[in-house]
Image (cartoon, grey):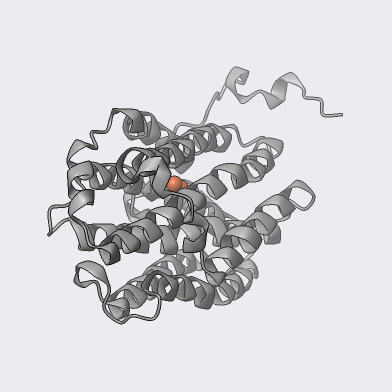
Amino acid sequence: MTTRTAQDYRSITPMGLDRSILPWRLYQKAKKWGIWDPAALDFSQDKEDWKGFTDEEKGYILRLVSMFVAGEESVTLDLIPLADAMAKEGRTEEAMFLTAFLFEEAKHVEFFRTFLNEVVGVDQLHELEGNLGENYRRIFFEELPQAMNRLYTDPSPVAQIEASCTYQMCVEGVLAETGYHAFFSMLEKNKKLPGLLEGVGYTKRDESRHIAYGQYLIQRLISVDRSLWKVAQKRIEHLLPIAVGVVHEIFQGQEVGAFGARKEDFIQYATKQFQIRMDNLERALTRSVEEIYHQREEELGVY
Ligand SMILES: [Fe+2]
Ligand SMILES: [Fe+2]
């Protein structure tokens, strides 16, 4: 049975909550930027645009939205073990940020599902599952739930690094980021689906905080045990080819897809995202844990 002493409740200690550390600042930003309401988005122009799309264009958008909606549902369900691990370590500020993080993921599921219901139409949604390819299933059906749920029985630093490399580095930092890039490059210049793009913009901003938290968490662990850098590297090397495989699945064998999107650009974009994350993580090798706690959110791409 879990018990606590009064000293475990940080909010009643003389110091109180630590307002100087990065998770607290991310929590403040979440209260400001994470409160947009998916139910308030206007999809009326999107419904008109959808009617004018070719079957190929509909296929690409539907594939991306299907991947996103199932992916957002997965990250909503799979974040809880990490919040549990931080709560058990007594990291109140991190648990507070993770509650906002979880709330935001729930809204992302609602957002993409509302687009499907309102714009595509429920009667058109019978074969959504067919949009999830083999690599996608490997990440969202196996790698992510396994890495996260392991934390319930093994919350060790190695398990936390492997979980966060899967969740925040690969799924959010590479796959979701590449997906936003796809939405914007396909739709923004063609001025299509403005309701979807508005919601994707808000989602992307929320994700910048989530990815920053993951980088902070991994850096914090590496800064106290530098041998964990190899664990992060190995995990990311394992996941990169699967993530690139997901990009191939979006294009289904084509080099140039709908709206002039080129597969090679997206593969390069995904690979570049991986490199950016690795470069940020590597900084932990030359920093103290105090420096990691107090780094600026802007350094980690939060906006
Ligand atoms: Fe999300
Ligand atoms: Fe997220």
Q: Residue most toward the right?
A: 1
Q: Is residue 170 visible?
A: no
Q: Position of residue 142 (x, y in %)?
A: 65, 62
Residue 266 sits in quarter: bottom left
**Foreground residue, 148 or 228?**
148
Residue 83: image location, x then y, percent: 62, 40
Q: Residue at x 31, y 80 (%)?
A: 264
The residue at the point 55 percent across, 23 percent down is 16
Q: Residue 249 at x, y = what percent?
A: 44, 72
Residue drawn at the location 23% of the way across and 33% of the way down: 42
In this view of the protein, which residue sits in the foreground, 36 or 22? 36
* Image mark count: 0
Q: Which residue is painted at 44% across and 49% down in the image?
A: 125
Q: Is residue 200 above or below residue 15?
A: below
On screen, 38 above or below 294? above
Whether residue 114 appears in this view of the structure is yes
Position of the N terminus, as image quadrant, is top right
Would you say 35 lies left or right of 77 here? left
Residue 164: x and y in percent read 57, 56
Q: Residue furthest front?
A: 123
Question: Which image quarter: residue 25?
Answer: top left
Q: Is residue 129 left or right of residue 38?
A: right
**Front one among 264 and 62:** 62
